[in-house]
Structures are given as C-alpha cells and as structure tokens.
C-alpha cells in the first residue's frame, strides 16, 4: 500500500487540527513482486560469484614463494579419482594408504 495524500482534519470539539494519510492499493501484482525478487536474487548471485573469482585471483597474485611452490607441485600431481580413496591402476585395484610413523615402524 502506498500513501496517496495527507488529508487535514479539524476537530470541532476542541479545535485541534490533525492529519490522516489516505492509502491506496499498489498497482503491482504478486507475480510482479515474485519476478522482482527472482531478479534481485540473480543479481546477488552474479555479484557473489564475481567477488569469489576476484578473491581467488588476488590470492594467487599475492601468494608467497612457499605458496607458489605448493600450488605448482599440486598442479603437477594428478589428483586420484574420486572413488572413495581407491586409485585405479591398470586392471588391479590398490587402496591408497597415507604414510604415517606407525606404518614406518612396522616395516
């Protein structure tokens, strides 16, 4: 609802003046409001994705030498397939196990 006009009233008993606001219904339908909300959400999504891409780009540009070495080593190494830690090599399946101090003592 939007305010259309202010109406001035004068009370006849005590002579006080007061104003009342006259309201009219809005011309937009519920579908118009929903379309506007979806459009706002799309704009927010675009701005958010742009911000994330920008931050990632700046993070790479401002990386220290240690971070640069780590990123280049990670890029050279291929990640294992996403199948629960099981790496497929040839026809045999081998489970990848992280190297720890306990596994070194056993050998």
Image: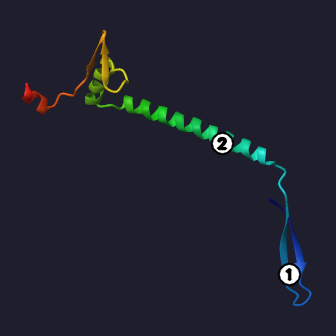
Q: Write down the quadrant of residue 24 in the picture.
A: bottom right
Q: Write down the quadrant of residue 55 in the picture.
A: top left
37 relative to 56 in the view: left or right: right
Q: Are marks 2 and 1 in contact (CB under 8 Å)?
A: no
- Residue 53, image x, y percentages: 48, 31
Q: Write down the quadrant of residue 86 in the picture.
A: top left
Image: 66 above or below 28: above
Looking at marks 2 and 1 on the same chain, the residue that comes earlier in the sequence is marked by 1
- Give me the residue at 27% from left, 28% from top: 65
In the picture of the structure, the residue carrying the numbered disc 2 is 40
Q: Residue furthest right?
A: 12
- Give me the residue at 22% from left, 26% from top: 97
The residue lying toward the viewer, choosing from 48 and 5, is 48
The total of numbered circles placed on residues is 2
- Give me the residue at 33% from left, 21% from top: 80
- Residue 103, image x, y percentages: 13, 29
- Residue 88, image x, y percentages: 32, 16
- Looking at the figure, which quarter contains the N terminus? bottom right
The residue lying toward the viewer, choosing from 61 and 25, is 25
Q: Residue furthest top?
A: 90
- Looking at the figure, which quarter contains the C terminus? top left
Q: Residues within 10 Å of mark 2 (few under 14, many from 20)?
A: few
- Give me the residue at 92% from left, 87% from top: 12
The residue lying toward the viewer, choosing from 52 and 101, is 101
- Residue 59, image x, y percentages: 38, 33
Helix, strand or loop status at disc 1: strand
In the picture of the structure, the residue carrying the numbered disc 1 is 17
> Label for residue 5?
none
């Amino acid at each position: 609802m939007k305010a259309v006009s202010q109406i001035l009233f004068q009370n006849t008993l005590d002579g006080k003046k007061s104003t009342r606001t006259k309201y009219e219904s809005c011309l937009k339908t519920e579908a118009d409001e929903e379309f506007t909300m979806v459009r706002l959400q799309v704009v927010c999504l675009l701005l958010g994705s742009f911000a994330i891409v920008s931050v990632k780009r700046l993070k790479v540009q401002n990386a220290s030498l240690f971070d640069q070495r780590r990123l280049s080593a990670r890029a050279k190494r291929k990640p294992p397939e996403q199948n629960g830690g099981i790496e497929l090599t040839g026809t045999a399946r081998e489970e990848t196990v992280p190297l720890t101090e306990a596994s070194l003592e056993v050998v």
